[in-house]
Image (cartoon, coloured by chain):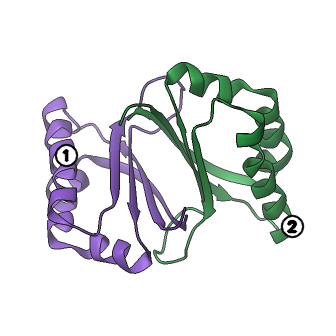
Chain colours: A green, B purple
């Protein structure tokens, strides 16, 4: 397997209502339709098994680093971040790596 | 796509020499051969594109939550954590979610 993976984990703040989280998920799930460089995209809320976990994860796969950069800087992606993630964000942990 | 995904991101401490990181990667990459419940397993060090990133990510896919729990509690996995991750660990962020 070759490719480039973006992994990001979020912890939400006290403004993260169910409605806001639904809008965030809808915004993220629209990105594969808007950004053809995305090869695989799986987001989800924590299953609640392990104490101390963060709240939400995004794993996105690309052909290579340049394709990831298109996604990172894409205006539709930036709009989802600005409108739906930043307002409910407490903590963020991210890594990008070669597959 | 159905399944259950485990995502964990690490930041290493000042004891994380190249030699220790190589031993950690070797230990993790041996797990799919030891734990048949692992369906996909991709680990990697941060590509260094984005400031503020953590250092290393593990994304592991399973058929379901029970298969993940076998992995989580497997003695070979716990040994890798105890011997190769905990000694170099500064921060950890994890999420498990349904695919």
- Residue behind mark 2: A19
Residue at figure coordinates x 21%, y 73% from the top left: B74
B43 sits left or right of A25 in the view:
left
Tell whether label 2 touches label 1 (CB within 8 Å).
no
Name the foreground residue: A54 vs A26.
Answer: A26
Residue A15 visible to an observer of this rendering:
no
State the separation of the CA atoms marked 1 and 2: 41 Å
Residue B66 at what x, y percent from top left? 38, 80
Residue at figure coordinates x 19%, y 45% from the top left: B24
Q: Is residue B67 above or below residue A82?
A: below
Residue A34 at what x, y percent from top left? 78, 36
Pointer 1 chain: B
Residue at figure coordinates x 54%, y 26% from the top left: B50
Pointer 2 chain: A
Residue B99 at what x, y percent from top left? 55, 64
Dot label at residue A63: none
- Residue behind mark 1: B24
Seen as rendered, the residue at the extreme front is: B1
Residue B93 visible to an observer of this rendering:
yes
Q: Is residue B51 above or below residue A48?
A: above
Q: Quadrant of residue B20?
A: top left
Q: Count neighbours of disc 2 (C-alpha within 10 A) and say few if under 14, some if 14 to 19, many if 20 or more.
A: few
Please tell me whether mark 2 sits on a helix, a strand or a loop. helix
């Amino acid at each position: 397997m070759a490719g480039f993976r973006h992994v990001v984990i979020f912890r939400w703040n006290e403004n993260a209502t169910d409605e806001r989280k639904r809008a965030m998920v809808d915004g993220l799930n629209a990105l594969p339709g808007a950004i053809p460089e995305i090869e695989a995209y799986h987001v989800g809320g924590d299953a609640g098994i392990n104490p101390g976990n963060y709240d939400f994860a995004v794993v996105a796969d690309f052909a290579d680093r340049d394709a990831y950069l298109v996604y990172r800087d894409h205006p539709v992606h930036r709009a989802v971040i600005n409108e739906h993630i930043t307002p409910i964000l407490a903590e963020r942990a991210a890594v990008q790596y070669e597959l």
